[in-house]
Image: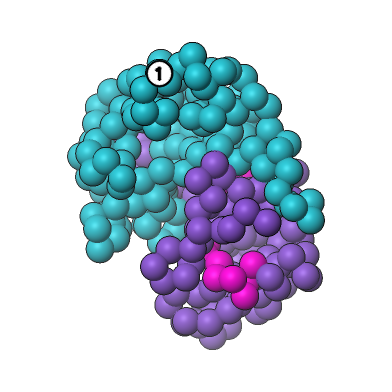
Chain colours: A purple, B cyan
Amino acid sequence: MEELKFDANGLIPVVVQDERTKDVVMVAYMNQEAFDLTLKTKNAHYYSRSRRKIWLKGETSGHFQKVKSIRLDCDNDTLLLLVDQKVAACHTGYFSCFYRAWENEWKVVGEKVFDEKTVYKDDPKDGA
Amino acid sequence: MEELKFDANGLIPVVVQDERTKDVVMVAYMNQEAFDLTLKTKNAHYYSRSRRKIWLKGETSGHFQKVKSIRLDCDNDTLLLLVDQKVAACHTGYFSCFYRAWENEWKVVGEKVFDEKTVYKDDPKDGA
């Protein structure tokens, strides 16, 4: 395959788009292992820069991302996943992490679809 | 405003989505100046990491991105632009830079909408 271009930390940014709504729901990072696990399982895996480990999206919340298509950009240094997003992508309870729009200040425009306190009982970002 | 979180190089990644087709067309980077110019002019400006300067998307090709909405993610470290993409985003002639999909190899699935040789006469990436 064309070689994916990982950065100096061995990571590649990944844009995630829900196939049904076409919403861009998040951006995360993969290393080679996360990419291989994603290909193998068809469930999105990422590399957490803060926790320094692979995570399966949905492992805590159940909000898995079933991967429908993987796209590569012209520079080979960014991926786009088209996914079936279960419930919501964002740990804050919004469907998309991009739930604020600039209208002379950042205003909430996104849809809140679950109560994050009932889903993430401990660390709200652990394995979101 | 909530502070944008720029990285160690003073940059923030920007996902660009065409408002009409909902296609994710590219990912680029902004510094504070590019962000301010984008807000002021409503035309997307980025910071080129290779050329180390601000560029107005479309300055060479005419393929401007009229900004319709600017979204911020939950971590304040990634932006999403909804734009009216003129002609095509990618310097290769495809509408989206994400024109290849993984099907046991990278296969072209995108739509080619212009001949890049007629648009970029010199450096094909200069001011794309």
Q: Work out whether residue B123 or residue A26 is closer to the camera in this orientation and state it.
A: B123
Residue at 62% x, 33% y is: B22
Q: Quadrant of the C terminus of chain B?
A: top left
Q: Is residue B60 above or below residue B18?
A: above
Question: Residue B122 at what x, y percent from top left?
Answer: 36, 22
Subunit of mark 1?
B
Question: Residue A70 at what x, y percent from top left?
Answer: 69, 52
Residue extending furthest toward the bottom: A122
Residue at 39% x, 68% y is: A8
State left or right for residue B5 relative to residue B74: left
Q: Amino acid at mark 1?
A: Lys
User: Visible in this render: residue A53?
Assistant: yes
Question: Residue A23 at what x, y percent from top left?
Answer: 62, 44
Disc 1 crowd, CA 10 A, few/some/many (<14, 14-19, 20+): few
Residue at 68% x, 78% y is: A59
Q: Quadrant of residue B112?
A: top right
Question: Residue B68 at what x, y percent from top left?
Answer: 45, 27
Count of numbered badges drawn on the protein: 1
Q: Is residue A111 above or below residue B76?
A: above
Q: Which residue is mark 1?
A: B121
Magenta span has A28? yes
Stretch of the chain drawn in magenta: A23-35
Q: Work out whether residue B45 or residue A89 is closer to the camera in this orientation and state it.
A: B45
Magenta span has A26? yes
Residue at 68% x, 27% y is: B111
Q: Is residue A56 above or below residue A19?
A: below
Give the secondary structure at mark 1.
Answer: loop
User: Visible in this render: residue A118?
Assistant: no
